Image (cartoon, grey):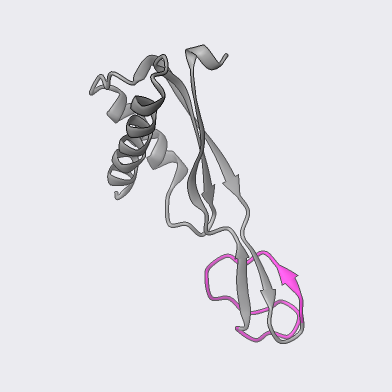
């Protein structure tokens, strides 16, 4: 479960930025997680809850994690068909060739975080 390490990196990024801005504790973290990003939303939520128990000074006790799922989308480089692939390499449903280029769904990033003074 690499989501523990991913969440540790997320906490490090937020804490560094939070320190620069001198904000109140963070009460909401929003992520964008692509269907093809190799990160599992349920495991990320569990990793977030585990990290909350470490009592980071920048994180409010009631902090919540919100995950926005980015749908996977590919476009066939042969026939131009757009489709939702179920994995990185998949056959185009129109021409049946494995020629899809992933154009969406690989994102893994912090969308935002909110502190009490931003409400």
Q: Residue at x 48, y 46 (%)?
A: 109
Q: Quadrant of residue 55?
A: top left
Q: Is residue 81 magenta?
A: yes
In this rendering, position of residue 85 left or right of residue 88:
right
Residue 118 pos. (x, y %): 54, 17
Q: Is residue 114 magenta?
A: no
Q: Residue at x 41, y 14 (%)?
A: 24
Residue 60 pos. (x, y %): 38, 15
Q: Which of 27 and 3 lies nearest the eye of the viewer?
A: 27
Residue 16 pos. (x, y %): 33, 33
Numbered circles on residues, count: 0
Q: Residue at x 62, y 83 (%)?
A: 99
Q: Which of 5 and 110 lies nearest the eye of the viewer?
A: 110
From this view, report whether residue 111 is shown above or below residue 108: above
Quadrant showing the C terminus: top right
What's drawn in magenta, residue-wise?
80-98
In this rendering, position of residue 65 left or right of residue 90:
left
In this rendering, position of residue 81 left or right of residue 43:
right
Residue 20 pos. (x, y %): 37, 28
Q: Main secondary structure of the magenta part?
A: loop
Q: Which of 117 and 33 lies nearest the eye of the viewer?
A: 117
Q: Residue at x 41, y 34 (%)?
A: 45
């Amino acid at each position: 479960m690499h989501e523990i390490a991913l969440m540790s990196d997320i906490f490090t990024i937020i804490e560094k930025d939070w320190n620069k801005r001198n904000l109140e504790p963070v009460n909401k973290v929003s992520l964008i997680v692509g269907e093809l990003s190799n990160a599992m939303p349920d495991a990320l939520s569990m990793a977030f809850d585990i990290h909350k128990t470490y009592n980071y000074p920048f994180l409010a006790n009631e902090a919540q994690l919100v995950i926005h799922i980015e749908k996977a989308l590919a476009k066939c480089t042969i026939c131009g068909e757009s489709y939702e692939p179920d994995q990185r390499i998949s056959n185009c449903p129109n021409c049946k060739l494995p020629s899809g280029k992933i154009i969406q769904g690989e994102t893994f990033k912090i969308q935002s975080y909110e502190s009490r003074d931003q409400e």
